[in-house]
Image (cartoon, rainbow, N blue to C red):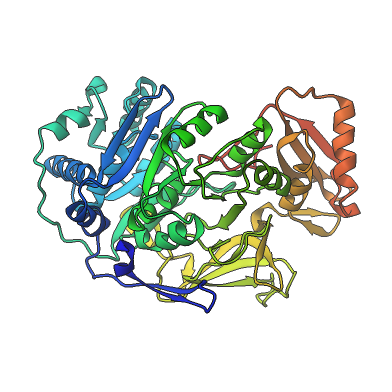
Amino acid sequence: MFYQQFCREQFDAEGRLIDFSLEYPENFNFGYDAVDAIARQEPDRTALVWEDAEGNTLTYTFGDISRLSNQAANVFLSQGIRKGDRVMLILKRVPEYWYTVVALHKIGAVAVPASFMLTIEDLVYRMRKINISAMVIVSDDALGELVCHVREEAPLLKTVWTTEGNRFGFRCLADDIAAAPATLERIDTRAEEPMIAYFTSGTTGYPKAVAHSHLYPLTHIVTAKYWQRCLDGGLHLTIADSGWGKTSWGKIYGQWLVGSAVMVFDFDSFDSRQMVTVINRHGVTTFCAPPTIYRYLVMRGNVSLPTLKHVTSAGEYLAPEVSRKFEELTGLTIAEGYGQTELSLTIGNLAGDPPRRGSLGKAAPLYDISLIRDDGTEASIGEPGQIVVRAKRGCQGLMLGYLSGDAISDEPIRDGTLLTGDTARLDEDGYFWFNGRLDDVIKTGGFRVGPDEIEHILLEHPKVAECSVIGVPDPLRGQAIKARVVLVPHTEATEELKKEILLAANDQLAVYKRIRFLDFVEDLPKTQSGKIRRSGH
């Protein structure tokens, strides 16, 4: 297979992947060495299938992506964008993202995908933090007006393209591409130079700009081949906006390298019935989505997805009850996985090992993983500890560092090791079970409580759709435990139901972990990547 020229794989007697290392030329560039190479071999091979909420569809071959990315690269070069420049992309789920980001890879500029939900303050912070010099944005009047205000606060921002039209004085990408040459002489880039940067979406603190090198796409071979189990000639759908790191995990790099086309469902308001129709209409074979999507599917019931062969989930806690019900409806077991913006797939229920409901899975073969207590010693089996990740070979699979100004800091990495700030337990069979974030720990009555373990129990109640648990000031305990709960649709928020949920949860919790306060809310604050934000309740 195409991807095998870039890696070495080792399997055990049962055929399970036990080791994985990258092999690459020192000038590896995904644009030239993957997209263009596939286009030369199979120009008519499908790369991207796109459908919007109105049912409009488009299909792009690798020949299309190669040509359009060359044209886009020539457009950027004509406006003075060069290797190392930072270019922000706010493109939602429109097809332009795929050939625009490849174009930036080809010229060595650093692509900075961002969410369309960012505020003026969010954008200005990002612009100033890493010296954004150009933007490509989706055609949207509200976003255009926002960017106009941002330009006044970001003097280094010189050029803005919109995908269509030329309102607000922006350049029109479609017009510029139509007039640009379709050939591009290869520009020299190095495999370990920065290629893409994502701002973190942590639940606390200011976002940091995580920089990855041109090797980053290759690390997602494991993600696509062994976790998502994408098929050569298959069609993979990951639910994510292009501004999220999940797009790199599930909508371009690993999938194309292992031979799978990517399906893009372009929607603004999620409709589970419509999504199921899209999956079945196009014959999607593998699927990845956050737990919230699976909750909607389970609540809908009567789900038929006959073309799907494998499904995965990551990003937040997946309630075992949701996983069980989804399996009853479809016959498919949801394989969970774990990673961070700073990493690729780190832990996962990989091919060869049966997925365990509620478990993150086992260590991915790029990494050695330890669980460390507060005192720096290794946690025992079954004992929570911080997830500490070490790349087996140099920094393969780790970020370059955090961008700030024109510099890249390797501050969080020491000797190829990253402290994640997440905690988990390890069982006797090598499966990891998520415990919580260190910075979310609630200190109550002298005890340390991870909010995730309480949220897991709350989500077992059939009337609870989402929840968030925090510590609030308490004169007796230091902190008391408070829960905020979003109910499933068409459920009345009554005092009787509140008592029922509290009783059901507290019956399963140790005395010091019991919920003291519970509020019903319409929704919960979330990060740009859709994770529930616990701060500021």
Residue 280, how many percent across, how many down?
Answer: 48, 35
Residue 203, how many percent across, how many down?
Answer: 59, 46
Q: Residue at x 37, y 60 (%)?
A: 216
Residue 490, how many percent across, how many down?
Answer: 73, 22
Q: Is residue 56 shown above or below 477?
A: above
The residue closer to the viewer here, 434 or 271, is 271
Residue 14 seen in the figure: yes
Q: Quadrant of residue 530?
A: top right
The residue closer to the viewer here, 27 or 63, is 63
Q: Quadrant of the C terminus?
A: top right
The residue closer to the viewer here, 399 or 339, is 339
Give the side of residue 420 with respect to residue 434, left or right.
left
Q: Residue at x 82, y 59 (%)?
A: 447
Residue 88 seen in the figure: no
Give the side of residue 442 with respect to residue 530, left or right.
right
Give the side of residue 252 with respect to residue 319, left or right.
left
Q: Is residue 87 shown above or below 121?
A: below
Residue 328, how many percent across, how many down?
Answer: 69, 44
Q: Residue at x 27, y 29 (%)?
A: 162
Q: Residue at x 59, y 54 (%)?
A: 336
Q: Quadrant of residue 8?
A: bottom left
In this rendering, the count of numbered labels is: 0
Give the side of residue 134 with respect to residue 153, left or right.
left
Q: Quadrant of the N terminus?
A: bottom left
The residue closer to the viewer here, 19 or 518, is 19
Q: Is residue 160 shown above or below 357?
A: above
